[in-house]
Amino acid sequence: MSKRHIWRSLRIDLADTEIVPPTFTALANSVDITAYGATSGSGDDTAAINAAIAAAKSQGRSVWIPAGTFDLTSRVEVAGVTIRSAGMWHTTVRGNNGRGGFYAVGGNVQLADFTFAGDVRYRDPDGVVTTDAAMEGNFGSGSLIHNVWVEHSKVGLWANNGTDGLYVAGVRIRNTFAYGVNLNTASEEANRNDPLSNTRVEQSVLRNTGDDALAMWSKNASVSNSAFTFNTATLPMLANTSAIYGGNGNRIEDNLFSDTVYTAAGVTVSTWHGALPFSGTTVVQRNTLTRTGGWNNDWNSSQGAVWIYAEGRDITAPVLLKDLTVTDSTYQGLLLSWQKTISNLTLDHVTFNGAGSYGIDLNAAGSATFTYVTVTGAASGGLNNPSGYTIIRGPGNSGF
């Protein structure tokens, strides 16, 4: 075959392009890791980076990672220190043999302007930890993660019990073996039962994660007053583009979610995975979901693009679904399951346009209010309600 014919047969699925910004310069009075023995491309820089962090903390200074490639063989602890770098296109911190990352302890931890390139090549079995997250810990007030690019780690960001006031913006997380971001209180370290609160992840892009791209999981204590806003998440290989498991007053707002693959929804609100009860009002609004939902071989059943799943506990605290556009759902546009009580649910100005099965599928007890909800193009019909779920119909509904 000639080269001309090869090029004619080429198909490009996705191309990301951008103008690479110039290299950033070191902050005044910062501690350069190369002054403590780190050398680009030379081998293990863990001890040098630890020494630079210790020096910066004792002197009230920040840490500078210059342009280059630096290697970690274990995670490094960061407490009350800012780590800045030359930019995500210019500074790379590499993990090795599944290990390496940054572990935050307490407030005023800042991580910015670098790429973390993990070396994780398999997913840990449940209950076994042999690989590291790129960023993990209990981030206190004043903590910031900004302009960080993560690839090939176990998890992009795993925020533990005690995290309060963390702000995450402009992050790219791709090709992880497990979660992109998980705000969770399931940590077994020191048997912590502290809550996680006031944390926001926004203006970030997540693609090809192994588990949920964006998750909040209230396991040992509540995740509260936290939000995923203005993000783009696509192609999680397993699980959802976004999920809230229990918690108090959390939000998923103004995001673009698309192209889930397996045992997945676009947005899940659930008491699954041993989650604590919901309290306050959980809000999912102004999101666009395209080609979401999936099939679960273990259950031999489908999962909707929007999935309200009362598994271990009923869901009776208010849940608001508002100003959602749900397009070309693989199966149901909205699924309520499974035969527990789901009440205080409100749908307001929600559009389901195209569904591989039902537009709305209700397999629960309880009641919900539907106002300006429209269903079009659902292959199996607008509504399936075998359990006699109570629909309180306000104005403006059609198609179901």
Image (cartoon, helix red, strand yellow):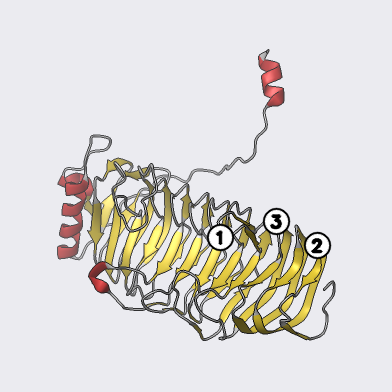
Of the two numbered discs 2 and 3 in the rendering, the one whose residue sits closer to the viewer: 2
Distance Cα–Cα, label 2 vs label 3: 12 Å
- First in sequence, mark 2 or 3: give its number: 3
Residue at position x 33%, y 61% in the image: 136
Quadrant in which residue 43 is drawn: top left
Mark 3 element type: loop
Q: Residue 396 carries which label?
A: none
Residue 323 to residue 299: above or below: below
Residue 398 point in image, percent of width and height: 84, 75
User: Label 3: few (<14), some or many (≥20) within 10 Å?
Assistant: many
Q: In which quarter of the image is the C terminus?
A: bottom right
Picture disc at residue 330: 3
Disc 1 to disc 2: CB gap under 8 Å: no
Q: Which mark is residue 380?
A: 2
**Mark 1: few, some, or many residues within 10 Å (few <14, many ≥20)?**
many
Of circles 1 and 2, the one toward us is: 2
Residue 331 x/y as whole percent = 70, 59
Identity of the residue drawn at 37% across and 56% down: 126
**Mark on residue 240?**
1
Viewer-side residue, 245 vs 253: 245
Quarter occupied by residue 267: bottom right
- Residue 30 can be seen, yes or no: no
Secondary structure of the residue carrying tag 2 is loop
Q: Distance between the residues labelled 1 and 2?
A: 23 Å
**Percent x, y of residue 72:** 26, 45
**Label 3 sits on what residue type?**
Thr
Q: Describe the element under mark 1 as helix, strand or loop.
A: loop
**Is 3 placed left or right of 225 in the picture?**
right
Label 2 neighbour load within 10 Å: few <14, some 14-19, many 20+: some
